[in-house]
Amino acid sequence: MSETNHFVMIIDDDHDIRESVAEILVDLGYQPIKAINGRDAIDRLRSDQPKPCVILLDLMMPVMDGQEFREVQQKDATLEGIPVVVISAHTHADDLARKMAVAAAIKKPIDLDQLMSTIRRFCPEIRA
Amino acid sequence: VGNGAYFMSDDPRAAGEELASLRRQLEESRRNEERTRLMVESVKDYAIFMLDPSGNILSWNAGAERTKGYTASEIIGKHFSIFYPEETKHQHPREELEQAVRDGRYEEEGIRLRKNGERFWAHVVITAIFDREGRHLGFTKVTRDITERRAAEHALRLSEQRFSVLVESVRDYAIFMLDPTGVVLSWNTGAQRIKQYSAGEIIGKHFSVFYEEKDRLRGHPAEVLQAALDNGAYGEEGWRVRKDGTRFWAGVVLTTLRDTSGRHIGFAKVTRDLTERREYEENLRQSEERLRLMIESVKDYAIYMLDVTGNVATWNSGATKIKGYTASEIIGRHFSIFYPPEDIAAGRPARELRIAAAEGRYEEENHRVRKNGEKFWANTVLTALYDPVTQELRGFVKVTRDLTERRKYEQEARKAAEQAGGDQARAFEAEKALRHRDEFISVAAHELRTPLTALTLKIQGVKLGMQHQPQAAPAKTVERLDGALRQVARLSELVERLLDVSKLVRGKLAMNLEPLDLAAIARHVVDDFSEQAHETGTKLTLDAPQSLEGQWDRSRLEQVLVNLLGNALKYAPGKPIEVKVSGTADRVHLVVADQGIGIAQQDLGRIFERFERAVPVRKYGGMGLGLYLTKNIIDAHGGTIRVESSPGKGATFEVDLPRRTTVQAHDPRVNA
């Protein structure tokens, strides 16, 4: 559990969603890194904290939204390799995800099975 | 023949020789006198004549005849006062002669008369003649007609005066002279107006005072003088300084002045205040820049230029959005790429260019094709651009609007209008309402999905826990179920708000008044937000007295606080937020102040309207109902809400409420 690639980042400005996802991540055996918007996420990713194996990204957020976060991430050589999964209530989330060239998109309300299988695509399985 | 005495020799031969010599000398002298007389007589430009001691004319020459008009026989013997006009003839002639006798000579310029009565300007010299014994023999008088010279001088003086008055009175140009070293020698009204110095203040000072310090330090005034000296004249535009220290944009021309011998005697300097022209040009440049930025940022219209042959020359973000091509993909390509193949085959793109070139403009609504091949319904306007001078065709501006959505609404609205009886205005209103409704439903669905997502996650978490750790402590499950219930409450709240809006639209906002303590409610709401404030690093402070009692609707008053505080946290995360409640005998006051992004002036008026938001939905979600409901709740309590804000400076919302509400009867929308 101490390996760096067991970290999963959740970026969402909504407190309840962020905490709920984090709780489930803990249940699944991952260590959540919580960020309240894109700016906060970038700051955490650039700190000396371990890098996550996947980033769960909300789109609509104040200060720095999901698309802006993605632009900054892609321009940063140390961060561009981290896969991003868009989680959005946006009606056109799929289109947006394609435009942003992210690894996957999950629509809100989140289907837990879809979330788990998506995370497992990028992070080593912790438990069966 | 000198003045000395003649001494006769005793020697008769010598005496004879002396006599012969004397005769020769006398003869010589007579010939001289004759030559002089002939010469005097023939002088035409000067009247030269002799007077006896009392002023009677003794001789007359050709110049006198020509100047005065009298012949010798007419005038000889007459008194010379005949040449004087009436106003001077009784005194001047006598005085002049007396002065000539006294001083040997009298000279003046004055008016004289010709025989025909005409006046002329004369330069007169009267010389008294004495013989060897000092007896007064008379006078010679030399008179010159200087009328023309006087006229020329007068004309010159007049023109100099006029020019000086002209220069003096010019207001729009500072016109002044500098000596060769740059010291100010003269000053006009325009110079005073533009530079603010009076003539007395500036004459004698060096002209470098008109320059900015940095120009003075780099020696620019001397450079300007040298440039004018080298080239005869020098012109430039630049900043100059007025007496009060303010700057103006000046157009300056310096001309080197030389006298007839070519000696450098100074400079003429003409300065014009071009500040307004510069401001105009600067404004023009800025407005062009703004226009360019505006066009680039327009998202709902594709606005781009075509060259004369129809190749795309510019591209804006609306064009990218509507057509799907980026600027680098499309610039240089022919615009027929936007047409369906059948239109290209029919030669429509070329035809449209021809019509626009001939008539100036071509407009149509038709199908166009996006980059991904999708057809869409578009309104296009093609405008020809001509060179304003040569009238030559420069290219075209094309504006394309995607009408797919509008077409859909029009069809719906037409249907609605048909049901409403076909009224145009009502059809328009119906279309607008439909559009608002659709936007609102989309935003509301998004808002509902957020707590729904959290709720689902909580319940799934419970299920997950049950599956994987059925024997784990029930405390965690209880915690998750609490979280699930919070989301249910949040959903209910949203549904309530939607219903409130629906009631407001129909004029039915129910009020349930009861005795309440606003200070306690504020403490409770601020407490609820403290966790969220802590997470975003926001310092949230409350300034409230022990209690503030009044009659209000509890849930609605809470809603006001939640809306204002929620907005502050949403738009000013990480910045201090202050909540203050206070009261007077019959009123209470609530202030929520943040230091966030603030609200633009033009948006302040509409933020209390339904579905309005002053920020993009992409960044800041929300239904656009919070402030609308807040205002209506406060209205229903008979209170007022106002906001003070400017972009980047945060926003301060101030609510004023009566402790006891009496207004319900005043507001038609409120029904207790």
Image (cartoon, rainbow, N blue to C red):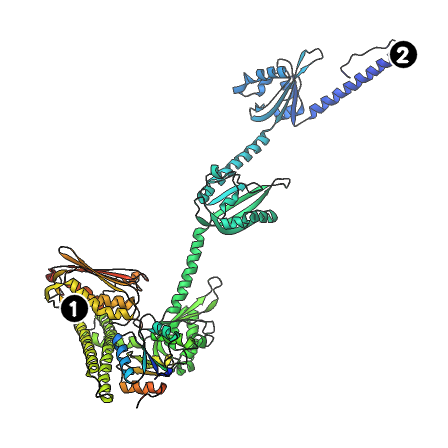
Please name which of the two marks, 2 or 1, marks the residue nearer to the observer.
Answer: 1
**Which chain does the numbered disc 2 sit on?**
B
* Figure disc tally: 2
The answer to which of marks 2 and 1 sits earlier in the sequence is: 2
Where residue B505 sits in the image (x, y, percent)?
17, 69
Tell me whether circle 2 and circle 1 mark residues in contact (CB < 8 Å): no
| Pointer 2 residue | B13
Asked if residue B287 lies left or right of residue B645, the reply is right
Separation of disc 2 and disc 1 at Cα?
158 Å
Q: Is residue B335 visible?
A: yes
Against B202, is B38 above or below?
above
Numbered label attached to residue B504: 1
Which residue corresponds to the image point at 50% horizontal and 50% vertical from the top-left?
B214
Q: Secondary structure at mark 1?
A: helix
Q: Tell me if mark 2 has few (under 14), some (14-19) or many (20+) residues whose alpha carbon lies within 10 angstroms of its own.
A: few
Of the residues shown, which amino acid type is indicated by label 1? Leu
Numbered label attached to residue B222: none
Q: Secondary structure at mark 2?
A: helix
Q: Nearer the viewer, residue B174 or B616?
A: B616
**Quarter placement of the N terminus of chain B:** top right
Against B379, is B21 above or below?
above
Which residue corresponds to the image point at 57% horizontal and 16% vertical from the top-left?
B95
Against B601, is A53 above or below?
below
**Quarter placement of the C terminus of chain B:** bottom left
Where residue B48 sits in the image (x, y, percent)?
66, 22
